[in-house]
Amino acid sequence: MSIVFSEPADPPRQRDLLLPMTLIGYGLTVPLMLGFVWAGALPLTIALTYAFTGLCANPALSWIWSLCKDTARAPTSAYSQPRLIGRMMLNVAIQLACIAVAPQIGGIVLLILIIFLGLGAGSLHLPARSLRHWIPLVGVLAALAIAAFTLAGAKLGIPVATSRQRWVSTATFGALLVYSALLGRIFTREHRRAARSRQAQKTEFLLLRKMAWLDDLTGLANRRALLDTLHTRLRSTKNSKLVVGLMDLDNFKDVNDRLGHAAGDALLIEVGKRLSAVLHRGDLLARLGGDEYAVVLPHCQNEHQLRHHAALLLKTMETPFVLEGQALYSSLSLGLVLHDKSDAVGPDALLRHADLAMYAAKRHGRNQYRIFDPSMERQIHDRERLLSWVKLALQARQLELHYQPILTVEPGKRAGDPRVDDVEALLRLRDDDGLHDAAEFEAVLDDPRLAAPLGRFVLDTALSQVLRWRRDGRMLRVCINISPQHFLQPQFLANLREALERHPQCSPDWLVLELTEHGSELNGHIAHHVVTACRRMGVEVSLDDFGTGSASLTHLQLLEASAVKIDRRFTSNLFDESADLSITYGLLRTARMMGLSAVAEGVRTPRQAHALVALGCRKLQGYAIAKPMPAQELEIWLQDWPRRLPWTATLAWQKAIDTEAIRAVVEHGRSLARAKVGTLDAGERERLAHVDASKRCALGRWCESQATEYGHVPGFRKLIADHEAFHACLRAIAEAPQEDAVMHVHRLQKLSLSVRDQFWKLLLHPIRTQDMAPVAHQLDPTASTSEPDPSTSYAPDSALEAGA
């Protein structure tokens, strides 16, 4: 619904000049009337009565009006100025009475009456065009005048019979003319002031109207104008369809944090200009606040047109913005709804649907658009149901923490290696249906309505448990996951401090906070301040799922983290995916160079554990070590975990893999990937076609450099043979036409699998069995000390099968 702003009908209030100017006028007439008494034209009693009545009646009337509070507060309109009207009528009556009683000076009094009428009219604020305001007042004045002139009859005149009378009349006329000129000057100045006041009021009105309908920063329509337009368009029968869209800038908060709010405002203005430039006549672009915009496209009548408009809106953001001399790239997440007017849906529902589509675009990676469909609303209902389930579970004490051990390995050291120093606390929900993993409800753990109370529960529960372990002699640290939503709230530091105060025997360094660094929530000064404050308390902070967010390296720059946890999606396919291997190796090297501890998540096999240790990882976590378990089960597991995991005894003797070996196997995998999809360029085909390509590639050079160490090992000789066969197959693919290359791909994959298998078998075997003998004998006195053949199946996997 629209709100119509109209200019006020009443002019601005003027100062009440009638009373002081009236009293001055009566003060002036006193000597004039006495002059007529001296000239013999007027009795003294009439002169004194006239002056006394005028000087006393006007203040008395003001006093009476001051007692009438309701009238004094009345607004300015025709009959809401009774004080001014009453005072004017009083003085007109006094003048007319004087004319009736002393008609011999009636001409003089008539002149005074005219002056009083001008004075009163100048003080009244009556609309000139409204006759209904003037007619009653003029009628009363006319009736009084007729009565006075009737009583005066033919005697009405100006005293000029004697020289004294002529002299007094002349002086009176002069004084009244001077007084009239003075009144004119005063009221001219007053009317100019009133005109300026009216202009200021009009300017203020225009500003208020602009504020009511337009955004004050960008000049675009605001939410009120948007809703009014939607109401109008929905009632219109011109088109059967209506498109409504919501969009906001991706990572706008980063701009404010890095460049300041002035730069952020400048960006919002420029975005508004760009979006407006691609809209058509009749379309509406509105800014709803912050970095959120809305668009109404009344002429868009089908999905094809909708997608065309959406692509145009996204394309406007491709050109960088120049702010403060810096090129800044930004993007939009856009949600659209194509509404059929035959459906009874209001503006609020349309905006809600567009909002759901916009957040779907954000969830799918930002810088894109999504069109609303009913399943999005069902997802919201499912989310609310899930949120209610977890909130009720928290209130009913159905949430609990399970703990997953983290294995610490220090290659080259025998005493106490490996060991368990840390455990991660993971949330579980237990109800009548059994135990539920966090994966079933993790979608709502970062909800603003749940994040803080859940974070306080985890803090208290974890601190209580680590204190019990310490009392029992188990020197464990507990790592807990904190939602970014809770971490960035103002009360988080107070929550952390209060939790530590409730457990005064807990040292702050027994606690590690893990922050999931997805997205850009942790960017900015607030996150830096909170992390620094935690470190000052003695609580360490770790970045969880490192490498998966949009700003991993930025987080390392801004946040004083003490550790990073490499996500399982990189560590799970080390042997099959060259990209995962190179990323994991790069993240481990980055962490080591920055002095950070690195934990590899998702370790599922002993072979994977040995590979990670060989890459330089010193902390391992995953199902190969143990699944998350309740605190009581963990205590039992800690008593005999070396017997359960005999393969871990070989981790400390695992040799490190050098950079050249990693580069060799990564380049090998990249060649396989490009050959499979047929994306080898001309230069690569030329190199692969060379007869010595197997020796010139990175893996060939590495094999040549390792011939002295591994030349006697059958697996090494098989590696070289399979590698040469692999290159022969590659050469056939490079020389064959595109359509004939497919027949070689299957054999190429088999050869590559064999090459990589032999490569890892060479590098992931214990140094020597006799070096393991003391530890192996301690774990199992009957263990054999014969040296394993590196060409056979991988020993640690066999150990897992034996000890599982």
Image (cartoon, rainbow, N blue to C red):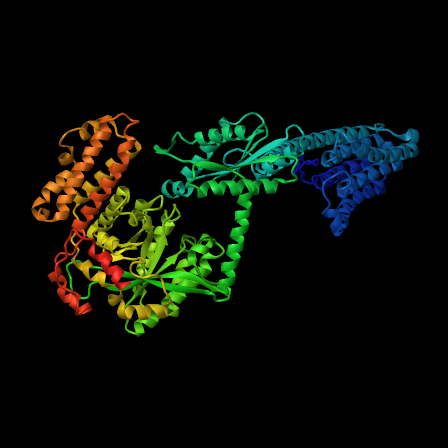
Q: In the rendering, at what x and y percent does residue 482 appear?
A: 39, 57
Q: Is residue 210 visible?
A: yes
- Residue 581 lies, in percent from the top left, at 25, 45
Quarter location, residue 323: top left
- Residue 85, quarter of the rendered image: top right
Locate the N terminus and report the quarter of the image it occupies: top right
Answer with left or right where residue 531 lies relative to residue 188: left
Across and down, in percent, residue 388 comes to 53, 57
Q: Quadrant of the C terminus?
A: bottom left
Whether residue 441 appears in this view of the structure is no
The quarter of the displayed image where residue 507 is located: bottom left
Q: In front: 107, or 719?
A: 719
Taking 290 as reference, is 473 above or below it? below
Apparent side of residue 607 relative to residue 235 in the rendered image (left or right):
left
164 on left or right of 249: right
Query: What is the x, y in percent for residue 451?
Result: 45, 56
- Tell me the residue at 79%/37% (across/down): 33
